[in-house]
Amino acid sequence: MTIKQTLAVFIGRFQPFHLGHLDVTERTLEGADRILLLVDNSYRRRSWKNPFTYAERRALIRAGTGHLGKPVATLPFVDTLYNDRAWITNVRTTVTTPMRREGLDRTKLEKVKSGCDAAAAPWVPITEVTPDRLSEDHFDIIHAMVSEVPFAYSSILMAQG
């Protein structure tokens, strides 16, 4: 049995989870039933660039989103520097596994890019994605999802079952 719900996926480092991230999360949940935050750099050692561990960031996210009234889940994300195909595969795997477990059907999957204005495009097969075609073919602006979010570099995937 599939459940008709919209799952949003927000990918970021969340070093730390701040008000910009919270704003994106709140705005995203206006059009989604639940959100999954994929925490990038989850397996990297603590450093000046990555001062918080995954567990610490997960705790900050839970503390900051507990009042939203909709499910906010977090998962560690395996980043692959300079390998776009592997990164896309990791996103797909990390997103579809919990969807299947919860009975969500991946009938519609689109990518929304945040920053200044958002762009949306259908989820594309991995064979069609090449770095030179990403921005040209797959991120044409369809509608604005979120307004300008300073310091928030992220990707949001919307899956509707």
Image (tube, rainbow, N blue to C red):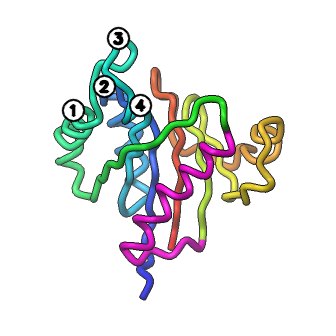
Q: If you read the primary sequence from the N terminus, does the residue marked by circle 2 or circle 3 appear first?
A: 2
Circle 4 SS class: loop
Circle 1 SS class: helix
Write down the residue under mark 3. Answer: 48
Label 2 to label 1, Cα distance in Å? 9 Å
Is 10 placed left or right of 129 in the picture?
left
- Residue sitting farthest toward the bottom: 1
Write down the residue under mark 1. Answer: 56
The amino acid type of the residue labelled 3 equals: Trp
Q: Which residues are magenta?
A: 84-107
Label 3 to label 4, Cα distance in Å? 13 Å
CB atoms at circles 2 and 3 under 8 Å apart? no
Q: Nearer the viewer, mark 3 or mark 4?
A: 3
The numbered mark at residue 108 is none
CB atoms at circles 4 and 1 under 8 Å apart? no
How far from the left and from the top, in percent, is residue 160? 52, 68
The amino acid type of the residue labelled 4 equals: Arg
Label 4 to label 1, Cα distance in Å? 12 Å
Image height of 38 relative to 93, above or below: above
Quadrant containing the N terminus is bottom left
Q: If you read the primary sequence from the N terminus, does the residue marked by circle 4 or circle 1 appear first?
A: 4
How far from the left and from the top, in percent, is residue 42? 37, 35
How far from the left and from the top, in percent, is residue 146? 51, 40
Q: If you read the primary sequence from the N terminus, does the residue marked by circle 3 or circle 1 appear first?
A: 3
Is 78 placed left or right of 129 in the picture?
left
The numbered mark at residue 13 is 4
Write down the residue under mark 2. Answer: 16
Image height of 37 relative to 132, above or below: below
The amino acid type of the residue labelled 2 equals: Pro
Circle 2 SS class: loop
Q: Nearer the viewer, residue 15 or 20?
A: 15
